[in-house]
Amino acid sequence: METQTISEEYRKMQQELHQNPHYGIASLSFAPLVADVIRQTGARSVSDYGAGKKNLLKGLGEAGIGDIQYLPYDPAFPEYGAPQPADLVCCIDVLEHIEPELVDNVLAELARITTALGFFSIHMGPAGKVLPDGRNAHLIQKPSSWWLPRLTQHFEILQLQTHNTMGHGIWVIVKPKEAAL
């Protein structure tokens, strides 16, 4: 049985939010940083988890990264298919949107598809957008002290940086935990 990472009701809300052209644009501001990670590591494939309208691909192209296998996944866009393993898994401005009771399932799925490195950005405050049911679009508004124990259950953190790109948040570069001996 597949582990649930999003409820059907919430998936429909996300599809509705994605009709807004200003929703799902954070990856554009992170694309130059992701491009640097690709150049430094020689990653040949990128899994864009929570790809939205594929703005990361657009931003990578603008940053001079063209020859890469791009694997988008987003439950609001079922045509993208299932999450795919890649050298670099990007999850940009997504984790704070996950239903709180499913965040551990999503982190486990990210760990499953991360073959070498992950780049995750997490916004820690309220979003400027509201869900159709009236809730803030950032379902999880927690500090790094809440996120780090969850991340370290699945990953080793290689780098952590605070950022104010889209308000208050962090980004991390992670690698999968080594299999137990």
Image (cartoon, rainbow, N blue to C red):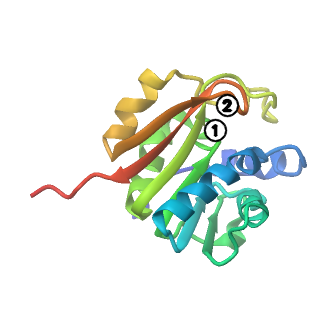
Q: Is residue 173 left or right of residue 99?
A: left
Label annotation for residue 97: 1
Label annotation for residue 88: none
The residue that label 2 is drawn on is: 138
Q: Is residue 154 above or below residue 110?
A: above
Q: Is residue 152 left or right of residue 165?
A: left
Residue 5 in sight from this viewpoint: yes
2 and 1 marks in contact (CB < 8 Å) = yes
Q: Position of residue 158 (x, y in %)?
A: 38, 44
N-term mark: 2 or 1: 1
Q: Residue furthest front?
A: 40
Q: Position of residue 50 (x, y in %)?
A: 64, 54
Q: Quadrant of the C terminus?
A: bottom left
Q: Quadrant of residue 145?
A: top left
Q: Is residue 159 left or right of residue 12?
A: left
The residue at the point 65 percent across, 59 percent down is 74
Q: Position of residue 87 (x, y in %)?
A: 46, 67
